[in-house]
Image (cartoon, rainbow, N blue to C red):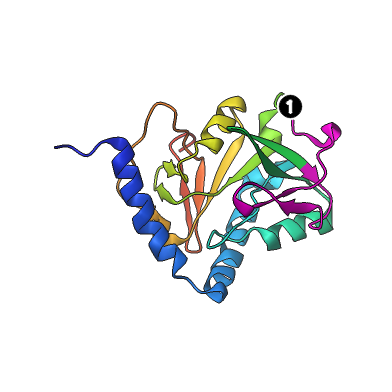
Amino acid sequence: MTEDIGEKKKRLRAKILKIRDALSEEEILERSRLIKEGIKALPEFQKAKRILLYASFRSEVSTYELMEELLSKGEKEVFLPVVMGKELRFYRIFSGEETKKGYMGIPEPSVRDESRLFLPGDPPEDTAVILPGSVFDEHGGRIGYGGGFYDRFLKEVPGVTAIGAAFGFQVIKEDLPAGKWDIKADYAVTETGVFTGSRIG
């Protein structure tokens, strides 16, 4: 019997996350610093006025050094997501202290003033979204954590630059199984290099 897309995704996700969860905190931070530099080197990141970050959780690529660096320089607007039902909404933060535990214990913006809400409609080239994920392929394919939050959000903001942050072992050579609802990343940035997604490559 042929394995369906959902089952294949679950199998790949479990396999890769088991490896990721075995990393030490020191390994995560060291590799994350290299990934941060790779992200910052992307032309689309450099020219973006708004950066939509995720707040890293457990064994994910850490985003906190990048967040603090961006906030301290003040050259770009920084946003973090809030889970609202089945949707993601991004709110601007001005300090790393403006967070509290939210969905699944993940840090979320504590100030949710509507004036801070990211609204689709601005020139898409002004915005870069940093994506978490469990597995990526070399052409921008991505498997998240099963909720579809980022796929739904990216459908709302066509044209923004989607940058996956992943450790090297999270990027596989085989093209990932994809459904009609799956959105590919423009880049997958690892500690060893950058993979250009099929949306632009």
Asked where in the image residue 6 lies, by quadrant, the reply is top left
Q: Which x, y percent locates residue 82?
A: 68, 41
On the image, numbered disc 1 is attached to which residue?
122
Quadrant that contains the C terminus:
top left
Q: Can residue 175 be seen in this snapshot? A: no
In the image, 115: left or right of 32? Answer: right
Residue visible at 70% across and 26% down?
120
Furthest-left residue in this view: 1
The amino acid marked with disc number 1 is Asp
Residue visible at 48% across and 59% down?
193
* Front position in the image: 177 or 18: 18
Residue 191 among those drawn in magenta = no
Above/below status of 197 relative to 72:
above
* Front position in the image: 40 or 84: 84
Q: Secondary structure at mark 1?
A: loop
Q: Which x, y percent locates residue 185?
A: 50, 40
In the image, 145: left or right of 95? Answer: left
Q: Which x, y percent locates residue 32?
A: 58, 64
Above/below status of 180 relative to 44:
above
Residue 115 among those drawn in magenta = yes
Q: Which residues are magenta?
A: 92-119
Q: Can residue 187 be seen in this snapshot? A: yes
